[in-house]
Image (tube, grey):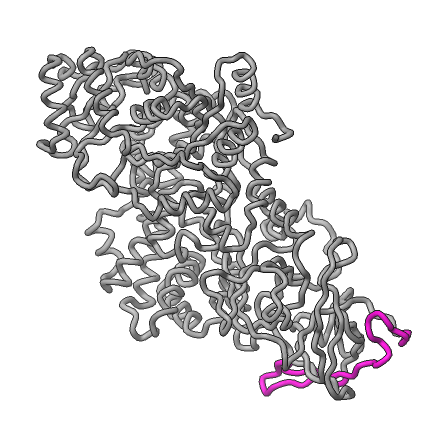
Amino acid sequence: MNEKKDFLRAIVEADLKSGKIEEVVTRFPPEPNGYPHIGHAKSIVLNFGIARDYHGRCHLRMDDTNPETEEMRYVEAIKDAIHWLGFDWGEHFYFTSDYFERLYDYAVQLIKMGKAYVDSLSEEEIRQYRGTVTEPGRRSVYAERSVEENLDLFERMRQGEFEEGAHVLRARIDMASPNMKMRDPLLYRIRHTPHYRTGSAWHIYPMYDFAHCLSDYIEGITHSFCTLEFENNREVYDWILETLQVKPPRPHQYEFARLNITYTVMSKRKLLELVKGGYVSGWDDPRMPTIAGYRRRGYTPESIVNFCEMIGVAKANSVVDVAQLEFAIRDDLNPKVPRVMCVLSPLKVTIVNYEGEEELDASYYPPDVPKEGSRKLPFSKEIYIDRDDFCENPPKGYHRLTPDQPVRLKHAYIIACEEVVKDDAGNVVEIKARYFPDSRSGSDTSGIKVKSAIQWVDAKKGKRVEVRLYDRLFKTENPQGVEDLNPDSLRIVQNAVVEPSVIEEKPDERFQFERIGYFYADPVDSTDENPVFNRIVSLKDSWAKKSKKKESPKQAKPRPEPKPRPAQKEERPPLSPDQQRHFDRFTEELGLGAAVADTLARDEALSDFFEKACTFADNPATLANLVANEVARELKNSAPDTLRFGPEAVARLAKMIDEETISTKIAKQVFEAMAKSGENPETIVEAKGLKQISDPDVIGPIIEQIIADNPQNVAKYKAGNQKLLGFFVGQVLKATGGKANPKVVNELVAEKLKR
């Protein structure tokens, strides 16, 4: 049993001890409208874990009451994720759609009791009639319909006689209730979309509040665990069961804090936007926070379960640092996986005084890992080392190979540089070195002292592989959407070289590429002919260092002596002289950030496009982001002369962002339209009505309505949870389709929440 007893386990134990229940029955009820993500993993571990710990059972139920978004492939993805995490539902696999007929009968029963009625108000009118936090709502005039009329209308709704939105079925509860969820909540709405299981048999579908509690009751659920956003729904949950007077035992709902992680979005709608927009390769893209994404990247099920148990179950919402998840996978892999060598940016080394070939014995595991296993390392006259492990003019403190400083080849010999070979452009293309025969690892009698050992791979027998260096998908701690994507979330190294044991022997499916990180052969793209390895996680959390803000001049500390960068720099080869000139101009003259400048400088077509666009632009920073992200994506599949837009059009789009005519999010939509139609951005914005909304008179009422609809979060914000400001801003942006000016929204929301 879980040694850390959370408050939900304490409730379960008390119910078992008191005899309130004989067997604990939980359920995991996902909606099959997307792939399950890491937040669902927490709920899976909680529900199945509690059932396991107390010798009960956990049901898997698909909450499939919205035919517009649900698909069978999502059902299979959910089942697959649960099994992969190590849990099983046995024979208890259900669908809410299994209960459609029974739910309909329960609704008819409420109508006959006078506790439900068919309302014909429009969606907007229903919202207006609901009232506000400080003002009671008013009941619809249609609530006066007779039982007979309501039964007739409800049956005709079922048969599909009415258009969507013409009628809804509502509970008759209390339009003055302080809990706005209790103000005659909707029970059924009309949908003519065929259901993926029931086809066109139904034209009405139950709302969550109605279907959930009754499905729990039908299945004999004892403890219905929901996240905190459903706290106000509990009153509706209990009202339906009590009003229908269903026979005990009845289920009870308990709320716990949902999982929120920094640098991660948990909204399936936003994840779907990433998939449909082509920002990722699919639901299982290794950068996605989906269980399928983590699995493909190389995370182990044990690491995910350990993470969920480590963060625990709380009653109040909080945000977990993503570094904890990364720690969990490192902690799981460290004592398990073999260590091997990989060269990301190969630099040829010819050992002039070595002849023949040999195989060196090398352990897969360091002394502090209590595992056995070794492999043979082929060694010959020609090897590869990483370019960053040689420096012709080294800074102080550089301990790797230089013209004057020997170095050890890990598991092999000490070598010293004899000659540096360069091409016509001045780039180092080969090192000629000599080795010391009596310096072999494990039997070194050379007496030569070196300060470090470097990676190497035999040039003849090493294997060429593609290495995908994944990083966090978003660049901000609290990302809102695609505008916060990290442009460096994936870097692909095409011609890395690994030692042959990685491909030939495969002692384990996961490896630690020493000094670089933990890696996993991509289960989708990797083949024997073209191996592809995903970086699961780096060896250390280098993100905090990368994202640390520059200190102000007053606080600045003396700059330490420059040191060679660790694995981070190994991800890309050095810039050529021409590329370096571009980079210097972009950073020094135009003031671009290093990451964007690097992306532009490395691609000649991209650099040329950006330079031409700059002649039409006032702000190169905004323009650079568009070119480095949007234009770069188009140029991957098209030649520059086949693009349907030109540098001037992209510059005008950047100007519209700077003038706040459109938001950066809307700009992506406009760019997509430009790429397809070739129309100028102004025409597209005008035709589609995409101009950014900055008028407080327009935004203000929207904010007031959202504040009125979320009294619980308003109270928490005023009690000191300032992070909820982002929630309200996000809701406003959602309500306006991303058109509202974020700056104006932030100011107005903060102002209105102070009242």
Q: Is residue 728 left or right of residue 569?
A: left
- Residue 681 sits in which quadrant? bottom left
Q: Residue 354 location, x and y as percent?
A: 77, 86
Residue situated in front as seen by the camera: 475 or 93: 93
Q: Can residue 593 be seen in this snapshot?
A: yes
Q: Is residue 15 above or below residue 750?
A: above
Q: In the rendered image of this protein, does residue 457 appear above or below residue 367?
A: below
Residue 745 in view:
no
Q: Is residue 484 magenta?
A: no
Tell me which corner region of the image, top left, top right, bottom left or bottom right, holds residue 456: bottom right
- Closer to the camera, 682 or 433? 433
Q: Which residues are magenta?
A: 418-447
Residue at x 47% of width, y 30% of height: 57
* Residue beneath the point at 41% across and 24% down: 221
Seen from the viewer's position, the closer of residues 552 and 503 is 503
Please give left or right for residue 286 compared with residue 741 in the image.
right
- The image quadrant where one finds the C terminus is top left
Name the spot of residue 736 as percent of width and height, x first. Answer: 29, 38
State the image quarter where residue 183 is shown: top left
Q: Nearer the viewer, residue 572 or 259?
A: 259
Q: Residue at x 69, y 49 (%)?
A: 556
Q: Does residue 537 appear left or right of residue 751 in this picture? A: right
Residue furthest to the front = 91
